[in-house]
Image: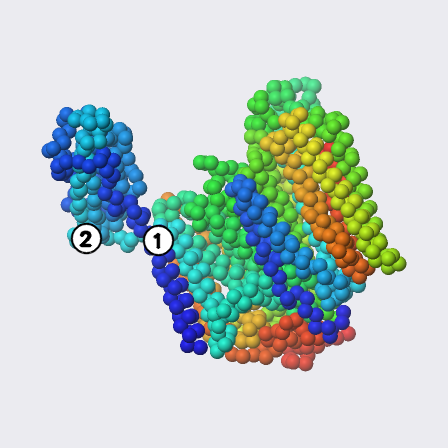
Amino acid sequence: MNKNRIRVISLMLVIFAALAATPQITSFPTGAGTNGNNGCTCHAGGAGTTTVTVEGLPESYVGGETYELMLTVSNPDIPGADISTNMGGFRLFASAGTFGPGENSTDLVQEKEGGATHTELGNDFRTWNISWTAPDNEGQIVDFTAHGNAVNGNAVTPTDGKGNTGDAWGSFETSIPGAAAMGGGVALIEQAEPFEVAIAAITFGISLFSLMLVYVFYRNNPDGFNINGLTTWLKKWLTTTDHKEVGTLYFVFSFLFLLIGGVFAMLFRLQLAVADNEFLTQDQYNSFFTLHGTTMIFLAAMPMIAAFANWILPLQIGAKDLAFPRINAMGFWMLVGASVLLYGGVLAGEGADISWTMYAPYSASSGEKGASAGTTLFIGGIIMLGISSTLGGVNFIATVMTMRAPGVTWMKMPLFTWSVFVANAMLYLSLPALIIGTLYLFLDRTIGTHFYDAAAGGDPILWAHLFWYFGHPEVYVLILPAFGIVSEVLATSAKRSIFGYRSMVYAMAGIGALGFIVWGHHMLTSGMDPTLRLLMMITTMLVAIPTGVKIFNWLATLWGGSLVFKTHTLWALGFLVTFTIGGISGMFFPVAGLDVHFHDTYFVVAHFHYVIVGGTIFGMFSAIYYWYPKATGRKLDEKLGLLHFVITFIAMNGTFWPMHQLGIEGMPRRYHTYSVDSWTELNTFITISAYIMGIAQLILLWNLIRSYKYGEEVGKDPWGGWSLEWTTESPPPTPSFHEIPTQGDANEHEHESSSGGLFSKMWKGVEAK
Amino acid sequence: MSYDDHDDHGHHGSWSPIIASIGTMLFLYGFAEKNIGLIALGLAVLVWGLFVWWKEDLPFDGSEKMGELKSAGTPFGGMKVRKAGMWIFLMSEVMIFGAFFGAYMRMRSNWNTHWTLRDKAQEAIDTGLAPEEYTSIDSIVEECMPYHNINVAKCDQITGGLVNTSFWGGGYESATAPPAYHHVAAEYITADFWTLLPGAINTFALILSSFTIVLALKAARDVNLDPKIRDKKIRNYLGITLILGTLFLILKLWEWNHLIVDYHFTIDTLAGSFFYVTTGAHGVHVFVGLIFITYFIYKAHIGGWDEKNAQSIEYYGLYWHFVDLAWVVIFPAFYLY
């Protein structure tokens, strides 16, 4: 056992060393090797002593100021006056700041590898003008190193007609302090490139994640711990087809990407905190918000839904596993492959900059003014995501349609299962439009088709249609499972069955059907036929009806029940508040006239973050607290949960509420920066709130890890739920049920276990007939 | 369903998903970087993943223990789960070809531009810019419709410049404007015997292959046959299906070659984009079918089929019929009309 401890500790040390080294590699000031080069001996040795002088350097520099320097090389033994060509050369380096050619020296001096050197033409001189721009940070001391060479020219005392008789090198070194280092001026904190921050954060995250994996493996069985067992353990996870294990993989994957997506959001919120900020370049900003959106939707929210669907759906309908376990595992691994393609571009510094909507014709273009080079890879990743989700969708639908246990009839199916069923039906029927759309885009970028190129008769609007034909059902795919979760959680917490079960089912199915005929409201400003605009406006507004039915049903469930405030209940109640706000702000967009004003402003950003964070993510958090005991046999810590909820709820509203006002005032989304000073105040507030919200998620992470070992142990049914997942052990065995169970009635369960309020009793009376 | 068998299907783990995922990733990466080596490597890894899958599938005997569960409840009660899954998957395939067709129809019917054109035509009539003889919207639209070999000058004249060439995105201004699909269809495809002939042969080849796959299924289910004769029959029928499918692909490539070499009808025009990508996507479906049928023939060769696991041929047949059906829709839409 001691040996194993040593092994683990040394493994951890290696990982920590790697972690410590990671940021160093990329932030070395001038890159490796270039600073130590003393110059060549291309002219085979030399004579005498060469003096190098640099004039024009200040006593102390002012940040951002440009100085004109004059570098002179002189050697009494090799007088320059007799020589007309190949008189000398130089290299000049500084530990900070940037070089460029000085006055009248554009042809003679060039910037090379972070320093300055002569050009081929500049060979014929011994004095050069160089410009040096000081760094912004005045709190440091800049070291200068110059190497100068006095050459004997081509024609003087030749033995072979070439200027190879004299290389006389000399050096010059000095240091210049910044204004602040002398006491005064502005000392800035050393800034790293945002790309480095992002990559370091991701590397850090992944290393921490690997560390966690090893730790979890170790904790699994501390006494019998054996490092050789690690491969067996890893093999189990890499090849698993069990729905619970694949669900866990989905969950871990989605949580990792939730944090990575959050890092991107924090980086560009820092950029937007004040007006005219230059923290991120435009390209960085574009690829960061592209990756933020795509990551959050495809790599965080959808996999988390898939995680719960994988874990809970078969348990709820009393199936031993999903219909096609291997295809299920393939869906997950396709997702992992897709994430590599999506991130391949940004890690190479050429991240896709086309936003998650990938609008043609920009996304189909390339070259200097087109989308960046990583875009092709990114689109390949989207195609792969499509394959992954199709496999998952077919699987879930087949499972619900064919594998329900006795008693789980369509109209007695738990609402979470219903919501996953409707969501996946929408997803797999709408995905083909995205797959074909991205296929066209991919081919446009690779083999030169012209689907979206207007100059060749193609049609960029076709992309918008194909994308939003998928895109709008997609946002319902994100929210419907949250509806299902909230229905389960509220009914269980209120200790009664859900109010209006049938209307809940019809509402969800209604949203599912309507979702396919509303996509045009994303394109109201695209020059669409006014008749179509009217149609889309009406159908979009119709969606509010089934959604409203659901909200009133939830309220009625609360009214008739006796509510228990657990953490998952808090999240569900928070969901009711924030999702309703988001739903109401959403009702502004289908009004074509208002949409022209709101289109592409922060009002849109506020709306969809209220429904996605306040809806989907709150629902998912509720599900984490609700089903964690089922998955692990231990409860999450309720105190930490309360803390997590309160901070996240307040910070979430602090982040997204002010965006409404900014949007109405006209702040555009997707812009790198803004010049309106009056927006700074709200934007700074948003940024601070965003950081609080982001950091608060670490509480959840800690809670998840800690409770795995130390949480309160629970039995089969800690919350008093009625559906079948609570009839099997926690955690469930494999296969999930020893005996296929038979589902009873929600109301009978409630009748046995507790007495509800007056309202629920009235309703039960009706059902009892 | 029986509940006491403790079936362990799906819990033994499989390397196939992760290998196939890496293969797909490498293939797409190679495609994006236009690197033939990576593309080939990706496909090879993908096929490796398929081999792993097939190796696991080879001993499949059609029993519930091996994963062939029966469906319970509406709507698929009593049906095998995999069959239901195939039908559900085919629904998404319908949507795939629906998207191809939707995009194609949008291009052919000018939905993207038609209403604006009508607006402009009405405006030209209202303001009196249109000449006397053009009194109805339709008469102006007839002249100004793009893809109808639009006469730019005339259209400009009869609408008083309201509909101008820039309206069509500028592409029709230049002398090198790409040929409209109507044009292409009229000139190269619908009227050319050497394009229509392979198309017609292909149609019959595919329909015939749908028939032979049913014969293979019938033979596999025939319990009265001697096992050796049965294996041979299954192998031969599947073999004919393979040959017909290969014939389809060869003729398809020959016809593409004919269009490219003789008419210079290439993929870098709008019409070419739609034609080659749609028929190509169908061709890929045929090709994937052929890969699977090769495995089926191998399984028949080693005597792996009997009446208990013959449903795999049936599920494959469902896919194959769908691919035929898609061709029956593509052929008239792209070749005849």
Distance Cα–Cα, label 2 vs label 1? 27 Å
Tell me if A173 is positioned left or right of B50 in this view. Answer: left
Q: How many marks?
A: 2
Side (left or right) of A183 relative to B144: left
Question: How far across and down, in percent of the image, does residue A297 sit?
Answer: 54, 54
**Of A755 and A635, the residue lying toward us:** A635
Residue drawn 69% across the image and 44% down it: B287
The structure residue drawn at horizontal position 35% and vertical position 51%, both measured from the top left corner, is A26
Reply above or below: B49 against A116: below
Q: Nearer the viewer, residue B70 or A454?
A: B70
The chain letter for the residue carrying disc 1 is: A
Residue A93: assigned label: none
Q: Quadrant of the C terminus of chain B?
A: top right
Q: Nearer the viewer, residue A315 or B159?
A: A315
Chain to which mark 2 belongs: A
Give amino acid for label 2: Ala
Kindly identify the amino acid type of the residue bearing the numbered disc 1. Ile
Question: Does dot 1 land on a helix, a strand or a loop?
Answer: helix
**Quadrant of the rendered image containing residue A405:** bottom right
Q: On the image, numbered disc 1 is attached to which residue?
A: A25
Report crowding for label 1: few under 14, some 14 to 19, many 20 or more residues within 10 A (C-alpha): few
Residue B251 showing in the rendered view? yes
Q: Marks 2 and 1: which is nearer the front?
A: 1
Q: Residue at x 61, y 51 (%)?
A: B46
- Dot placed on the residue nearer the N-terminal end, 2 or 1: 1
Q: Which mark is residue A181?
A: 2
**Discs 2, 1: same chain:** yes
Q: Are marks 2 and 1 in contact (CB under 8 Å)?
A: no
Please provide percent x and percent y for residue A209: 46, 63
Residue A493 appears in the rendering:
no
